[in-house]
Image: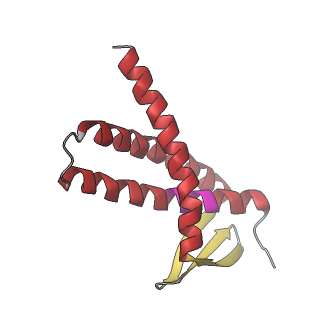
Amino acid sequence: MRSLNRDELNIASRFLYLSMAITVIKKDLTEVQNGSFKIKEPYLILLEKMLYLAAIERKELRINMRKQSIKVYLLNKNESFSTYLFTAGNREEKRFYFNPAIRKQVVPILNELMTKAAVQVQDSASSN
């Protein structure tokens, strides 16, 4: 039985997936910085812009979550599954995720961030 309503669940899920996207972007930034790319700057600029946009959205989500008393807790994680507890006020819902399914949800967020970042980088490059 669901204890959180659809809106609360959507906010908590977006926060969870966006947080994972931020982790991926940070790891990719490190890989590019330490990698053997011939020209690193365009990749670094794009990844840094993606990280910036993701951080802004996550901050807005946190504010919204605080207003609605929504919290997300990692309860358990192994190679295959992760268990999270979502709470909203006095209500709670335990959710089990297949880790590859989580990754599948993160990919569209990365694509969305990449598109937004590319547009902003292009706009700033054309205005110079």
Query: Of 40 and 68, which appears nearest the observer?
Result: 40
Q: Position of residue 98 (x, y in %)?
A: 59, 78
Whether residue 10 appears in magenta in the rendering, the answer is no
Q: Position of residue 13 (x, y in %)?
A: 63, 62
Q: Position of residue 116 (x, y in %)?
A: 51, 36
Whether residue 15 appears in magenta in the rendering, the answer is yes
Q: Position of residue 62 (x, y in %)?
A: 55, 53
Residue shown at 58%/50% (left/top)?
61
Which secondary structure dominates the residues rendered in magenta?
A: helix
Q: In the orientation shown, which residue stands out farthest toward the top?
A: 127
Quadrant location of residue 122?
Answer: top left
28 above or below 96?
above
The stretch in magenta equals 13-18
- Figure disc tally: 0
Q: In the orientation shown, which residue stands out farthest toward the front?
A: 38
70 above or below 122?
below
27 above or below 98?
above
Residue shown at 26%/51% (left/top)?
32
Residue shown at 40%/59% (left/top)?
24
